[in-house]
Structure formats: structure tokens, C-alpha cells
Amino acid sequence: MRLLIVDCRFEIENRKSQIENPLPSSAIENQKSKIENCYNCRAPLPPLTPNAQRPATCPSCKATLYPLGTLYDHCQFCNAAQPILPDNKRPSHPCRDCRAPLPPPGQRFLTHCPACRYEVLNVDTYGHRIHERCPRCHAPLPLVLPADPPSPTPWPLNNAA
Ligand SMILES: [Zn+2]
Ligand SMILES: [Zn+2]
Ligand SMILES: [Zn+2]
């Protein structure tokens, strides 16, 4: 008696491509279990959904919320937290709060002459440089200076000195 080798290949190829993981599985394990607060109004945020997503807006103040891992810096004039997108751009250029112009992340606008400390804000409401040189000592005035790098928390959580 002969055994027939039956080639019973099913079409599983098509199914495989539909079962792909929609989320990159890395970088989500580090979620902290502590309650997070809205970067705008500081109200506690609802817990993340099972796939680590936040609601699109804050339930309290309706500010747009940004994904986990978003960095923040602060308006140097009113201290409001400013989200920074993954491509190092800002979602809006004027400050969300006081509408002052914002420098590139990691920089701050010059407020004093570096040479003589004369108080001179060297930026106009459009973010453009006003003075080439210090009105008092004539030293060249930059538009921006290096500042603290953006941080993953909108404000220091444990700021008790
Ligand atoms: Zn809020
Ligand atoms: Zn501001
Ligand atoms: Zn000066």
C-alpha cells in the first residue's frame, strides 16, 4: 500500500499580515503609576488607556494633551509650561498663556546685555531681534542665549527645597 503525501498548505500568508501590532512594544513599560497632572491647569489626569494613550484634551481645562514622552520647557516671561513635539518644534509659537514669542527649545531670549548687564529685552512681539548692539556699552547683543534643556515633566514635581 502506498502512502500519499498530501500537500495541504493553507493560505495562511494573507492572515499573517493582518495581525500586526499597532503599537511599538518598547518604551511603554516605563510608565509611572503615579498620577499625572495637566501641564496647563494641573488637574489630575485620568489614567492612561490600556494601550498607553491619553485623552486628546484635559477634562478640566480642555487643553490639548500630548503623548507620553513629550518634553516641556517654560515661557521665560510667565513660566507657563510649553510642550515640544518630537521633531523639536512647538505646537504654537507664541506662549499659550501670555502670547509672548518663544525661542527655540533649549534657548532663552536675551534680557540683559552680557557685557554690562544693562537690562535690554532684545526681542519684539514677532520674535525678531531689536538691537544689534547694547544701547549703553555697544557690545554686540545676541537674540538668544543657551538655557535649560526641555524636561519630561511640565514642572518639577518635587520642588520642595
Ligand atoms: Zn487642564
Ligand atoms: Zn508666557
Ligand atoms: Zn551693554
Image (cartoon, rainbow, N blue to C red):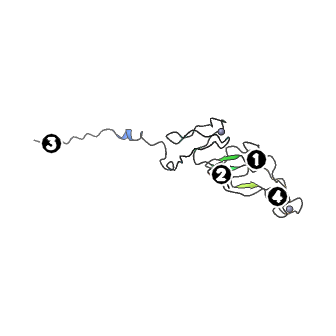
Q: Nearer the viewer, residue 2 or 68?
A: 68
Kindly state the secondary structure of the residue where label 2 is placed.
loop
What residue is drawn where x is 73% and y is 45%? 95
Nearer to us of marks 4 and 1 is 1
Instruction: Tell which tag, 4 or 2, sits nearer the viewer.
Output: 2
Asked where in the image residue 99 lies, by quadrant, the reply is top right
Measure the alpha-carbon separation of dots 1 and 3. Answer: 84 Å
Residue position for label 1 = 78
Q: Are marks 4 and 2 in contact (CB under 8 Å)?
A: no
Q: Amino acid at mark 3?
A: Leu
Q: Which residue is mark 4?
A: 112
Q: Which comes before the other along the chain, label 3 or label 2? A: 3
Q: Splitting the image into four quadrants, where does ligand 3 fall?
A: bottom right
- Compared with residue 117, is residue 58 higher up or lower down, i.e. above or below? above
Tell me if mark 3 has few (under 14), some (14-19) or many (20+) residues whose alpha carbon lies within 10 angstroms of its own.
few
Residues packed near mark 4 inside 10 Å, few (<14), some (14 to 19) or many (20 plus): some
Q: Is residue 144 above or below residue 15?
A: below
Q: Quadrant of residue 45?
A: top right
Mark pair 3, 4: CA separation:
92 Å
Tag 4 or tag 3, which sits nearer the N-term? 3
First-in-chain label (4 vs 1): 1
Closer-to-camera residue (76/156): 156
Which residue was labeled with disc 3? 3
The quarter of the image holding the C terminus is bottom right
Q: Position of residue 37 (x, y in %)?
A: 62, 43
The image quadrant of residue 109 is bottom right
Label pair 3/4, CB-CB below 8 angstroms: no
SS state under label 4: loop
Sooner in the amino-acid sequence: mark 4 or mark 2: 4
- Between residues 82 and 31, which one lies in front from this camera angle? 31
Q: Are marks 2 and 1 in contact (CB under 8 Å)?
A: no
